[in-house]
Image (tube, grey):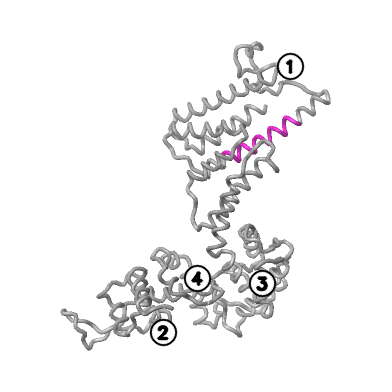
Amino acid sequence: MTTRAQKVEAFDHVVETVLEFAKGTAVRYALEDSGYNDIDDLITMDKDEVMALKYFERDSKGAVTAIDKVVPMKARKKLLHLLWWRDFLVSQMTSKLLQIDEWKALTKDAYDVFRTNQAPNIARASAITSSGGGNAVGITKSQVSEFQKGHKRDVSVYMSFAGDWKHWFRVKRNWTSNFAADGVIDIVQPGYMIPVDGTEAKSLFDAKNRYVYNVFNACVKGGQAMVILRKHEVLMDGREVHLGMVNFYERKANLSLIRLQCMADIAELKLTKNYPGGSLKFFQNFQNTYLDLENATGKEIDDDKKIGSLNASLEDERYASVQTTIETVALQSGSQINYADYLQSMITHAENLRTTGRRNANRAETRRNGSGRGRGRNGGGNSNDPDAWKTDLTAFIPYRIYKDMSEAEIAKRKEAKQQKMTGFILHSVCATEKLSVAEVILMWDDVIATGFSS
């Protein structure tokens, strides 16, 4: 049971810490003069109360005078936005009941984020409703008809969901993308304001809402998601089904399980030469797993941690040279290694390896057909000295010699060429001091791709 002292404590926290209304300010006088001093007084406020707030002026000794004044608009708007935050949070909750702990847990930063990201949308929706009965944006019957008959929608493109929390974020990404394509993404947003009954805007909302419900009816196959769907089957309320699933699958307990699962998956991800689906599939899985982890934690993971995890997962030795080059370039240029650039360099290298593999396979097929001509696979191009390869590990080798070389000798020469290219790039960086790490990485990959695949 909540005590009177706890209500007062929550009130003081919100007013002083979150809203930053110090004692002795106009809004504090107004609240005091209205007899508002605990959280229940804030919880039950409405827009009219906020906009009508007045206070009695104090004299130099702090005594109340008979002169009443209106609270400055800026202060009233801050208080009004607090009520919007209250309604916004409640709209995402199944219980529709905001506990005192939620008020005490609210921070100034969280409130500021809400004012920046959500309050403008709510303000626009409020203006539309008050000025035009929810239809001031000009929603017409033809627009409702266009939604129903225009764009061809297909529920089969939506991913099925059996209710397993492990797959929630992956399924949610698919649904969100398709909702956007089908023109219904607006109604599943938490801050969306449902239009007034009897307007064309409400008719459009109803059409979209039924479609979203039909999507869920086709896609949801079990688990708590099915229970949530059943709760809204009478009214076919797709919006409430979506908010209910978000509320359940993104609650603290589930997010903790998702975080643990993501960390376990990251630890098990290992890129080997035989990774199922190839290197590009590995990098896709790595990125998606980290995105799920960031969604579950609600914050972006530091670049250093992601780079460290990526390095630990690379067991294919073909990527060791990329790691070494990037680290050396960063050291030489005094630049910080950026995760996005680092990852892109790995992906680019994976694409080059795939291209090289296909090209080598085609050449091998050509030679088997007896139509091989020109240079061997060792690269290096034509040389003025046909015997240069005897003393220079990076020089061109005639095919008649190359085809009989041992694998160890071929590997040694490839490594020498790679080191030569790396040295060339590092020299360029040191000489120009104008290339970023990302630019050097891309140059290095281009040189490696052309130098070893010719």
Label annotation for residue 48: 2
> In percent of the image, x 69 and y 76: which residue is there?
145
Task: Say which element carries label 1.
Answer: loop
- Circle 3 or circle 1, nearest the eye: 3
x and y percent of residue 401 in the render? 72, 15
Magenta highlight on residue 240:
no
Task: Say which element carries label 4.
Answer: helix
Q: Amino acid at mark 1?
A: Asp
Q: Which residue is mark 4?
A: 121
Quarter that holds the C terminus: top right
Magenta residue span:
345-361
Contact (Cβ within 8 Å) of mark 2 with mark 1: no
Contact (Cβ within 8 Å) of mark 1 with mark 4: no
Label annotation for residue 418: none
> In percent of the image, x 50 and y 77: which residue is there?
97
Tell me if 366 is positioned left or right of 210 in this view.
right
3 or 4: tag closer to the N-terminus: 4
x and y percent of residue 393 in the render? 61, 17
Task: Say which element carries label 2.
Answer: helix
Contact (Cβ within 8 Å) of mark 2 with mark 3: no
x and y percent of residue 116 in the render? 44, 65
Disc 1 crowd rating (10 Å Cα; few below 14, some 14-19, many 20+) is few
- Circle 2 or circle 4, nearest the eye: 2
Pick the front one: 127 or 304 = 304
Q: Main secondary structure of the magenta part?
A: helix
Q: Which residue is mark 1?
A: 404
- Circle 3 or circle 4, nearest the eye: 3
Pick the front one: 169 or 206 = 169
